[in-house]
Image (cartoon, rainbow, N blue to C red):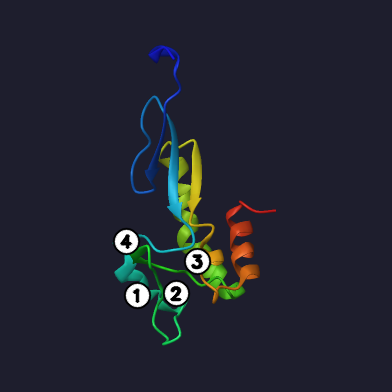
Amino acid sequence: CVAAHCARATRRDATATALDGAYSVCYVNGFQTQPDEAEEWLTSRAHLLLRDSKGEPEPDPDWPDEYILDPSSAENRESILSIIGPAIDGCARSGFEAVEIGNLDTWTRFDRINPKGAQALARAYGIAP
């Protein structure tokens, strides 16, 4: 393609700003914690984290500095949405054209996640029928 006619697209974390001149997609981790927010989740939001068989917060084995959110109850989903929702809203304020809710498949990788709860959270994010 000729550079002047090529569409540029980029994906950036919700903490970044959109790239001028590109179709910018904002990444928000909707089903796991962000690495730089792990401590906050472990201390003040620990009740929203999935627990392993020993009762400890469940990390993602592929991303050990990210913990799995527990969308099993309506109360948890409401609390998670009250935390993640403002990040999604911030994407628009930062100039992004689209939002990618990351780790939608988390419920398929952890047996302790209630599939109906995960699907309800996805619907709350506006990404599932």
Separation (CA) of disc 3 from disc 4: 16 Å
The residue depicted at 65 percent of the width and 69 percent of the height is 116
Residues at badges 1 and 2 in contact (C-beta under 8 Å)?
A: yes
Separation (CA) of disc 4 from disc 2: 14 Å
Q: Amino acid at mark 1?
A: Leu
Separation (CA) of disc 2 from disc 3: 10 Å
Q: Nearer the viewer, mark 3 or mark 4?
A: 4
Mark 2 is surrounded, within 10 Å at the Cα level, by few (under 14), some (14 to 19) or many (20 or more) other residues, namely many
The residue depicted at 70 percent of the width and 53 percent of the height is 129
Q: Position of residue 16 (x, y in %)?
A: 33, 44
Give whichever of 84, 53 is nearer the camera.
Answer: 53
The residue depicted at 46 percent of the width and 62 percent of the height is 83
Residue labelled with disc 1: 42
Residue labelled with disc 2: 49
Give whichever of 126, 1 is nearer the camera.
Answer: 1
Badge 2 or badge 3: first in the primary sequence: 2
Residue labelled with disc 3: 80
Q: Could you say whether the residue bearing mark 2 is in a helix, strand or loop?
A: loop
Q: Amino acid at mark 3?
A: Ile
Q: Nearer the viewer, mark 2 or mark 3?
A: 2
Badge 4 or badge 2: first in the primary sequence: 4
Badge 3 or badge 4: first in the primary sequence: 4
Give the side of residue 84 with respect to residue 118, left or right.
Answer: left
Badge 1 or badge 3: first in the primary sequence: 1
Q: Amino acid at mark 4?
A: Pro
Q: Residue furthest bottom?
A: 54
Mark 1 is surrounded, within 10 Å at the Cα level, by few (under 14), some (14 to 19) or many (20 or more) other residues, namely some
Q: Could you say whether the residue bearing mark 3 is in a helix, strand or loop?
A: helix
Residue labelled with disc 4: 35
Q: Could you say whether the residue bearing mark 1 is in a helix, strand or loop?
A: helix
